[in-house]
Amino acid sequence: MPGTERFGDDERREVMEVLETGILFRYGHDDLRRDRWKARDMEACVRDYTGAEYALAVSSGSTAVACALAAAGIGHGDEVIVPPFTYLATIEAVLLAGGLPVFAEIDDTLCLDASGIEAALTPDTKAVLLVHMCGAAADMDPILELCRERDLVLIEDAGQALGAWYHGRSVGLFGATGAFSFDFFKITTAGEGGVFVTNDEARYHLADSYADHGHDHVGSNRGMENHPIIGFNYRISELHAAVGLAQMRRLESVRSAKRANKAILRDRISDLPGLSFRRIPDPDGDSGTFLNLLLPDRTTAESAVESLRAANVPGINYWFTNMYHFINQWDHVKNLASAAPLAIHALGAPQDYRALELPRSQDVVSRLISIGIGCGWEADRTERISDDLRAALARVLG
């Protein structure tokens, strides 16, 4: 949990500045807040770091994705290409927007690729919801070309990829809209929080209203603001934004530390027989969040997981059996179990989710082990982890 590894005086100071005013709400109360606007400042930091023209801090990464879909015009009956390997909020957001998820294959980037997207297209496909998994960008050039050729709206769920770049451009800014997460487990955290980004002014204003009950935020009297659209409450609090602001200011130092530690681990095991690594189209743009190993087959991967855990190697993730991140465990999605009927119940699912055949994705994820990289590891601990990692894998790979 890199963000939380470096909690300190900066976070405490920003939070105390909010508590001193008593204004935890992000809008209004200008006369009481002493010109302290933590959500605005957090948004400015995200804009400065990523190069986004517009950024909107919201209550979670999930609500940032909801805003990204809404601002991109996704709604009732729209088919949206999605990956089977993602945090399940990606799929929930499409369903709750009234959309129809269409699952497509991932490749060894751990993300959707152009061939998988193309194979899943139908005449009714409107958008691609691309997820940049495990801290690095998808192979963007072919995806962008396909979206242009087929007139598809590209939306980016970069919840796991703040600090990731593709040939000098931040993830989240290739499509119409994008979303980052600031939850407890991310490279930067606000405890709970997210940020919507776009370079399109009209889409920004849609998201800005959508996230705050439709308010247009024009004028100085909140009670008299117009409501151009129907929205809901996806606002971030000033307390969460205060933490997110402090974390944004240290993002690049966290990213650098993680990349350095990841390089040490990778170099230590790179010559092991049968071991390969997740393909990163732009290695210089990797955020360093995870070291992603690809074992020869599922059986070897499962044995390696046991060996790594027995050796107390930290941060081991085997997504193939993870309840949150891979489609195999999403029975509620496959059965379309919901509290109340959704658009998909009336319109019908575009695929039989209980009988999906995604052999390439099944193969990749069954062989994948991801190791979370710390930013606070001292040099001796990093060396010790790298030695334990090599020994544990060597017991399986020979």
Image (cartoon, rainbow, N blue to C red):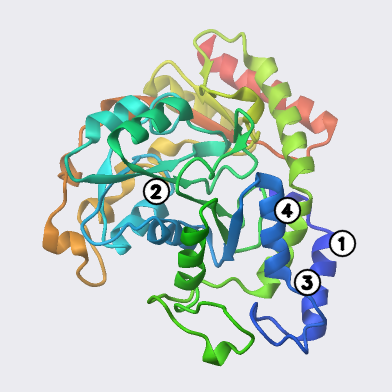
* Numbered badge on residue 9: 1
Which type of secondary structure does the marked residue at label 4 adopt? helix
- Which residue is rendered at x = 59% and y = 33% of the image? 371
Point out the tag, 4 or 2, that comes first from the N-terminus. Answer: 4
The residue that mark 4 highlights is 248
Between circles 4 and 2, the one closer to the viewer is: 4
**Which of the two residues, 216 or 112, is positioned nearer the viewer here?**
216
Residue 339 makes an appearance in the image = yes
Residue picked out by circle 3: 15
Q: In the image, what residue type sits under mark 4?
A: Met
- Per the model, the C-alpha gap separating discs 3 and 4 is 14 Å
Among numbered discs 1 and 2, the one appearing first in the sequence: 1
SS at mark 1 in the image: helix
**What residue does disc 2 label?**
323
Going from N to C along the chain, the mark reached first, 2 or 3, is: 3
> Relative to 48, is 14 on the left or the right?
right
Q: In the displayed structure, does residue 146 sit left or right of residue 133?
A: left
Identify the residue at horizontal 31%, vertical 31% (top origin): 149
Q: Quadrant of residue 302?
A: top left
Whole-angstrom CA distance, mark 2 to mark 3, is 34 Å
Give the crowd class for mark 2: few <14, some 14-19, many >=20 residues within 10 Å: some
Q: Quadrant of residue 189?
A: bottom right
283 over 88 or under it: above or below: above
Residue 341 screen position, x and y as percent? 19, 69
Q: Residues within 10 Å of mark 3 (few under 14, many from 20)?
A: many
Amino acid under label 2? Met
In terms of image quadrants, where is residue 319?
top left
The mark closer to the camera, 3 or 4, is 4
